[in-house]
Image (tube, helix red, strand yellow):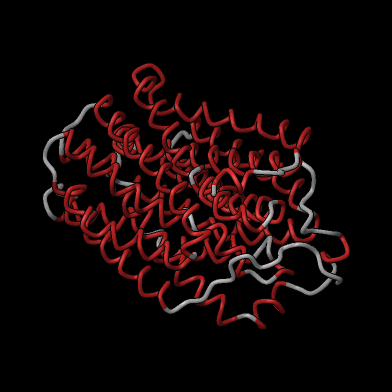
Amino acid sequence: MALGALKGWTSAQKHAVVASYLGWTLDAFDFFLMVFVIKDVAKDFGAGKDDIAWAVTLTLMLRPVGAFIFGRLADRFGRRPVLMADVALYSLFGFATAFAPNLLVFLVVRALFGVAMGGEWGIGASLAMESVKPEARGLVSGLLQSGYPTGYLLASIVYRNFYDVLHWRGMFLVGIVPALLILYIRRTVPESPGWSSAHARTGTVLAVLKKHWALALYAIALMTAFNFFSHGTQDIYPTFLQVQHKFDVHTTGNITIVYNIGAILGGWTFGLWSQSLGRRRAMIVAALCAIPAAYLWAFSETATMLAIGAFVMQFFVQGAWGVVPAHLNELAPPDARGTFPGTVYQLGNFIASYNAVLQTKIAIHNGENYSLALAGVAIAAALAIVILAAFGREARDVKMGLSPP
């Protein structure tokens, strides 16, 4: 099935998918550098870990703003030029984090990074999904979403191998590297076949949302559950390993590398399966399988068992997520495909953005015990996904090409 989906691809289709995958990978790389250094940034600024956790929350809260702004620009001016501008901005703000002189500036820069980060997913996903043939969408969906754990994996490798030399400011200096992606997009990626200047002048996003308000509310609820599922199992897990289990840089880095490999494999697997199993069924199976994995992932005592539990957990968490790019783009109204998927995704992110602070506060209240906070959020989010997916709809194989305006 996978090989069949890859047959007959044009050079333009391949470059569109590669650019979208790399855009999300490098965006996530910049974001996940933050989760490794919460403890160290808190020490440098004389603040509490829960104060620094607001940097993660602010990044997530501002992502809907970026999704809407860049999504509208992409619907108006095309996916390709707006994607390049977005990559430039998130690279710049990631780099600027290294120079923050105090906590206030640090939080402001991370908030601005959130605006830029929020724009990438929707534009990249629409560019890829509009470029490939329908039978390849499941495979491409899993590949695109695996860019997120791939970015986390790269951040894990940098943290494990270079933190002792770079420290937290030096790690953020590496955040300028994603800007090189702009050169690749400029040279090799054509505009999406699902966009034209004529379509850009038809309708407004408010008219689209008014017409499809029920779909928008459903998608936001689903993405809220999904974002609690991912961020609730990722963002403070390194802190859990460092603080509760007293693991050093190298052990923490090794465990995060292991579970991000599981996440990548899960995204590929369930994204591909969703092409035959169906989008909603694939989500439900992955979410249900994550529930029994939560105990091993959150309550194990040794590094080996935690690594195994984390691998399994992220296989299913990102397995469910591997279906999302295809599912949201297939559900999206054609006239707002640059805006709708990214905006509903990031609005769900906004609602779930308090997660890092919430879990950190629960852990501190329980004597730096993160296990209950991690498991509680993960299981609740998995159950919400099962219920919402079961009562939703899907539009697998819907046509995404242009129709007369």
Q: Residue at left 29%, top 39%?
A: 238
Pinpoint residue 87: horizontal percent, then vertical percent. Answer: 64, 41
In the displayed structure, 349 sits above or below 162; it is below
Count of numbered circles on the image = 0
For the point 66% across and 63% down, the residue is 339
Horizontal side of 261 relative to 84 (left or right) equals left
Residue that lies at the very extreme toward the top in this rendered image? 165
Q: Is residue 351 above or below residue 167?
A: below
188 on left or right of 379: right
Nearer-the-camera pick, 252 or 163: 252
Q: Residue at x 73, y 49 (%)?
A: 82
Where does residue 145 sit, x and y in percent of width and height? 51, 49
Q: Quadrant of residue 171?
A: top left
Q: Is residue 82 left or right of residue 42?
A: right
Query: From the image, which quarter does the C terminus lie in?
Result: bottom right
| Residue 164 locus on image (x, y percent) | 34, 19
Looking at the image, residue 373 sits to the left or right of residue 98; the answer is left
Q: Which residue sits at x=57%, y=64%? A: 328
